[in-house]
Amino acid sequence: MAKEDYYELLGVSKDASAAELKSAYRKQAMKYHPDKNPGDTEAEIKFKQVNEAYEILKDQEKRAAYDRFGHAAFEQGGPGGGGGFGGGFGGGFGGGGFADVFDEIFGAMGGGRRGGGGSSRGADLRYNMAISLEEAFEGKKAEITIPGSVSCESCDGTGAEAGSQPVNCPTCNGHGKVRAQQGFFTIERTCPSCHGKGKIVKNPCKACHGVGRVEKEKTLQVTIPAGVEDGTRIRLAGEGEAGTNGAPAGDLYIFLDIAHHRFFQREGANLYCRIPIPMGKAALGGTIEVPTIEGTRTRINIPAGTQSGQQLRLRGKGMTILRSQARGDMFVEVSVETPVNLTDRQKELLEEFDEISREEGSSPESEGFFSKMKEIWKDLTD
């Protein structure tokens, strides 16, 4: 089945700016996120396709190759999309297939993207990790296991059997490129025999079949710093896919997704929460205890006459600020609770209170409001 156009997947035009691409990607990723579509296989597939499209189009060189060659530019081991949520693992952002396309576009100038000796650098990989708001506040050390390829231990990544070494390619004499004369022009292309490596393996390693890398899971320790925000990207250099024939490995990028908290809402370094308090406490004032993000409780003073919707500020009780010892603030929004299921005695006391309040002006806002209403009604009847 033909793959859907990357621009159509993201819902943007082919001349979309980087900012437009990013905005469109976030919108589509949220729409098809597995957390919002549990058990929906089609949404999961769409989510992966959206990630794949964005990883290609956000890179100027890959986007140029895609605009010229379409999906064919990445059919030979090219980049893949992101993995699933909460410990998902995705394909690489780059690979040898793109290097071949780059050579085809700029081959006459010798502008390849291969590593030393023509070997291909390993692809970058992506890992999606879900963490709690508490973990974002405190930071954490996590252990992750990722599938992928590592340098072959049997041949030290050379691809050649022990006791032998790769030899110069007889077609290109070790240059990795061949030249052809066409009229007045000399055209230089990647060597078809060694695929630009300049070397060939006469006695390939039995463990890796001459590639220099093998498929193997590896376990890594990851440090999540305190204060990270949703979407933070952590780069682990050299922990991506192994390169071929001894070329450098790619990088591993960990993308953080902070789970929704049942009590706190986060805005930057500040935290917001909503606390109900009894009507008497709001009227008379007092203190209450509220939970904090670090798992403790703290006291907060309720001023006499506090109204619903009023925010009380606790300085330094918010989120940790990344790479800093400072913290944001915590804002408590008060919700005054009207009493229900009253006893006869309670009703009697409230009626008495209501009568005294009207005489002494204890509710200036409501009294002022209804005074204005009387004036309006009078104007309407005149």
Image (spheres, helix red, strand yellow):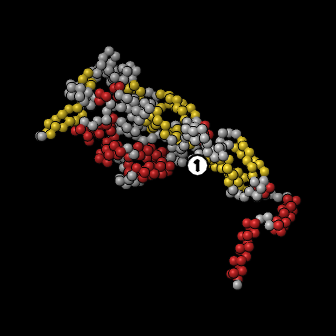
Q: Which of 380 and 131 lies nearest the eye of the viewer? A: 380
Residue lying furthest top:
163
The answer to whether residue 279 is seen in the rendering is no
Q: Is residue 301 left or right of residue 167?
A: right
Q: Is residue 367 left or right of residue 203?
A: right
Q: Which of 12 and 45 lies nearest the eye of the viewer? A: 12
Which residue is at 51% across, 41% downward? 232
Q: Quadrant of the C terminus?
A: bottom right
Which residue is at 16% across, 35% downward? 180
Q: Which of 109 and 94 lies nearest the eye of the viewer? A: 109
Q: Quadrant of residue 176?
A: top left
Which residue is at 32% across, 46% downward? 64
Classify 230 as above or below 283.
above
Q: Quadrant of residue 186?
A: top left
Query: How many marks are shown on the rendered structure?
Result: 1
Classify 356 as above or below 277.
below
Residue 223 point in image, percent of width and height: 54, 33
SS under mark 1? strand
Q: Which of 221 and 304 lies nearest the eye of the viewer? A: 304
Residue 185 point in image, percent of width and height: 15, 40
Q: Is residue 29 left or right of residue 372?
A: left
Classify 107 as above or below 200.
below
Which residue lies under the disc numbered 1? Answer: 267
Classify 374 as above or below 198.
below
Q: As shown in the figure, which amino acid type bears the numbered disc 1?
A: Glu
Residue 120 point in image, percent of width and height: 33, 31
Which residue is at 40% across, 49% downward? 18
Residue lying furthest left:
183
Residue 229 point in image, percent of width and height: 54, 43
